[in-house]
Image (tube, grey):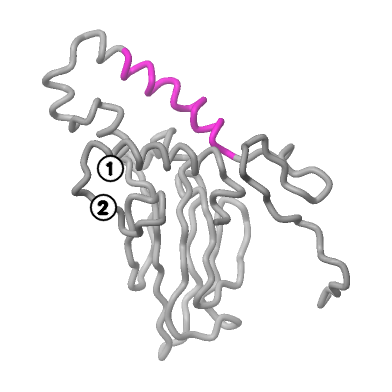
Amino acid sequence: GLFKIYCYAAYSALLTQKEDFLAFYPTAFYPCEASVFSAATVELGGPHRNRSDWRGNIPPFEAAFWSIVTAAGTFRSLHGGHIILWDLGLVIQFPAGSSILIPTGIVRYSFVDVGPTEERYSIIQWAGSGVRRFVENGYKSDVEFAREASEEQHIMRENRRIDSHVQAADLFPLVRDVQEGVLTFEYPGINPPSLAAPQGYESDD
């Protein structure tokens, strides 16, 4: 819902990828049928580590593919379990049942410890890069592509890799999309809600 509304370009790219992959491989399945995220995991505590390659670098195209992080467990959210967005300098209260969209390719995050008798888990949905590469390789694994692709196909793939920085930037929502408290898109069928407070609303501040 919110991912489709506020990150429509990234959502659309993942939806197309999902449709192409399942059309070729109909016996495969995603963790959640209604989701465009091809992978899911459950973290049972301990430090979180953002995805990266063995050098610690984030593949550029992965930067724009957001993850949905959902908190679970039994803990007092005023005292612990807050999510820390290190690159944004934010600490946010994150009670069980809450979900947050994070571009985990470029934003590192972790959680404040909970009490010794409390439990906190994370349910994470994310876009596995293996599916994207399989589709881009013409429905072949990296090994098969390396063995069977022509020189021209290898050049085209390398050009796509170089251009992936631009592609990633195009998948991010822009500040200019927010005008007068309302998100505006040029995509048909999308009617995002107003960001302004409804009439009669009184802030707790």
Q: Dot 2 lies on which element?
A: loop
44 displayed left or right of 82: left
Q: Residue at x 32, y 36 (%)?
A: 20
Q: Residue at x 18, y 16 (%)?
A: 149
- Return the residue found at the far bottom: 117
Q: From the image, which quarter does the C terminus lie in?
A: bottom right
The one nearer the camera, 87 or 139, is 139
Percent from the top left, x then y, of residue 10?
Answer: 50, 40
Q: Residue at x 35, y 44 (%)?
A: 52
Percent from the top left, x then y, of residue 78?
Answer: 60, 82
The residue beneath circle 1 is 22
Per the model, the C-alpha gap separating discs 1 and 2 is: 7 Å
Q: From the image, which quarter does the N terminus lie in?
A: bottom right
Give the magenta-colored segment's residue range: 156-172
Dot placed on the residue nearer the N-terminal end, 1 or 2: 1
Q: Is residue 6 magenta?
A: no
Any mark on residue 36, and which? none
Percent from the top left, x then y, of residue 77?
Answer: 56, 81
Q: Residue at x 42, y 42 (%)?
A: 15
* Predominant secondary structure, magenta span: helix
Q: Dot 1 lies on which element?
A: helix
The residue beneath circle 2 is 29
Amino acid carrying mark 2 in the image: Phe
Percent from the top left, x then y, of residue 25?
Answer: 21, 41
